[in-house]
Amino acid sequence: MEEISTDILVIGGGLAGVLSALEAEKSGLSVLIVGKFAIGLGTNSSLATQFTAANSRFSKQDHFEATVKAGKGLCHLNLVKVLVDNGTAAMETLKAYGIPVIERGIGYTIDLPKQSAQLPGVLLMKGLVERLRGSSVRLLPGLTIFDLVVEEGEIQGAFGFFKDGKPCLIRSKATVLAAGGAGAIYQRNDNQRSILGDGYTLALRAGLPIYDLEFVQCYPFVLAEPRLSSFILHVESKEGRLINEKGEDLLEELGIKENVRQARMTQRDRLSLFLYEASQKGDVYYDLTQVSEEAWDHFPLNFLRKSKFPFRERPFLISPAVHFFMGGVETDEKGATGIRGLFTAGEVVWGLHGANRHGGNALTECAVFGIMAGHSAAEYARQRESQQGQGIVPEPLTRKWERKANHYLRRRRGVFDHPRDLLKGLKSLAWKYAGPVREEKFLKEGLDHLVSLGRKIEQVYPATPSELFRKKELENVSLLIRAILEGSLLRTESRGSFYRTDFPQPDDPHWLKHTCYRLEKGGLKITHRPTKPPPSVH
C-alpha cells in the first residue's frame, strides 16, 4: 500500500476543488488534489457557462431575492448571504488567476475568443489547471477515493485505489471534499459520466448526515437524438421553437407567451415537467431552422455546427434530463462540517439552494465556497501543525487500512451479472421511478426493483481493478437511489424541483422541513427537521 502525506488534501477536480487547492497553497502548506480522472476537464464545471452574481445591472439584493425565491422556503439564509456578499469578489479572484471573466446579464461569463466554439467552462478550467501546474500543488489524477479516514471525530485523510488496483492511504491535517453531483446515476442526464455521487456516499459512510437528496433539478433542453451524446443545449436564439411530431408549437399549448430563450430563464421547472410528460406521449423537437445565418457563427450555435448532425437543416429530438442535486452535506459559513478538519465546497454542499437552484448559482457556489474552503482548510491545518503530536497519524492506522485494502481486494469465485449491465439497470430505474414526476405507487415499485438489483450487486466479486471500481460505483449508486426513493415517498407534497402527481401542491404547515439521511448500523435512517438557521456544526 502506498502512503502519501500532505498538509491539505482536496478531493475533487472541478472548479470548487481547484480553487480550494489554489487558495490553500497561498498559505505555504503542502496541498494535494486528487480526482478519479483528469483534474479540471472531467468535471461538470467544464460544461458550465454562467455565473450569477451582483454586477452593474444586478444588485446583491436582486441576487439574494432571486435565490431565495427559487428555493421555496428551504434555503439556509446565512449561506445565501455568504454567496451574495462574496460573489463579485470571487469573480475578481478568477480574474487574478488570468481567467477572462466579463459581465453578462445577471452575472458573469467567460469571454470567448471571437467565433470560438469552445465551451466557456472548458476555457475556465483549462486556465485554472494551468495555474495549478505552475504552483506547488501536487496533482494526482486517476485515484479513486473509497473512504474518508476519520479517527475520534477528526479527519486523518482518505483511502483509495489507483487505476491499477494499488491501494493508497493519504494522511492529511485538513481535507476539502469537493466531489459533488450525482446526475449520472440517472439514465437521462447532462452531467459527465463520472458524476455518480461519490461525495455524498463518502460523507454518509464517514458518519455525516446528508440532507434533502430528494430535490433533484432537471434541465428542460437536453439533446435526445439516439446516436448522439446527451448534452445540455444552451438556448440563446429567439427564433428557436419547441414543437411536437405534428409541428405544433408547444409553448403555445402551455400558454407561455415568451420565446424559448426567455422561458428557459423564467419557466424552467414548469417546462421540465411539461416536456417530460409530453415526451412520454410522443417526440418533442427543437427547431432551429429559422435561425439567422449570422447566429450560427457565434457560441453556442457554432458549437453545434462542429457536429456532422444536421442541426440547421431539421428539427431534432430533445427531452429534460437530470442536471443538479440540491441536497448534500451540512456546513457552516466557512465550509466546516461535523467532522473536525473536513471542509466542503461545490455541489456536495447542502442548504444554499433550498428546494431548487437559481440558474447560474452552481458556478458561483463553486467559486465562493471553493475559495472559502481552501482558506479554512489551511487555517485548520496550520493550527493542527502547531499542536504537538496532533498532526501525526498513529502507526496502527496504517495496519487498519492495509486490512481494509485486503478486504476490498478479496477475490471470491462466482458467476455474476456484468457490472456494466447492473449500472445500466440502476440508471434506468432511477429515471423511471425517481425522475421529474413521482408518485407513491411507482416509488414503491422502484424500491421493490432496487431490492432485486441489490441482491445481484452483492454477488459481484471483483477479480480485476476495473471490477473493483465498478462494484464500488454500484454500491454508491444503489445507496443514493434508495435514499431518493424513500425520501420522496415520505415527502407528501410538491415543492421547487420536487413534484408528486398524488400531492401536486406545496404543504407549508407540514413540509416546511428538511429531510435528513443517515447510515446507522449499515441501514438508511431518515428523519426530518423544521427549517431554521442551522446550529453550529461544532
Image (tube, grey):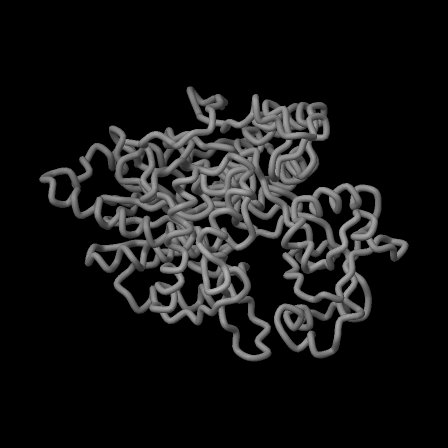
> Where in the figure is residue 147, as x and y percent of width and height?
38, 37
Q: Is residue 142 visible?
A: no
Q: Residue at x 55, y 48 (%)?
A: 358
* Residue for point 42% across, 37% down: 329
In the rendered image, the residue lying farthest to the right is 246
- Left or right: residue 129 versus residue 225 is left
Residue toward you, 397 or 341:
341
- At 52% from the left and 73% from the top, the residue drawn is 112
Residue projecting furthest to the top: 521
Taking the spot 38% from the left edge, 52% from the top edge, the residue there is: 85
Toward the viewer: 194 or 264? 264
Front one among 468 and 490: 490
Residue 22 vertical placement versus 421 (above, below): below
* Left or right position of 405 against 454: left
Q: Where residue 314 sits: x, y (%)? A: 82, 66
Q: Nearer the viewer, residue 366 or 262?
A: 262
* Image-based side of 468 in relation to 249, left or right: left
Residue 223 can be seen, yes or no: yes
Residue 206 in the image: state x and y as whole percent. Answer: 37, 32
Against 96, residue 512 (above or below) is above
492 versus 300 height, above or below? above
Task: Identify the image quadrant of the C terminus.
Answer: top left
The answer to which quarter of the image holds residue 343 is: top left
Q: Quadrant of the N terminus?
A: top left
The picture places residue 528, in percent across and down from the top left corner, at 49, 23
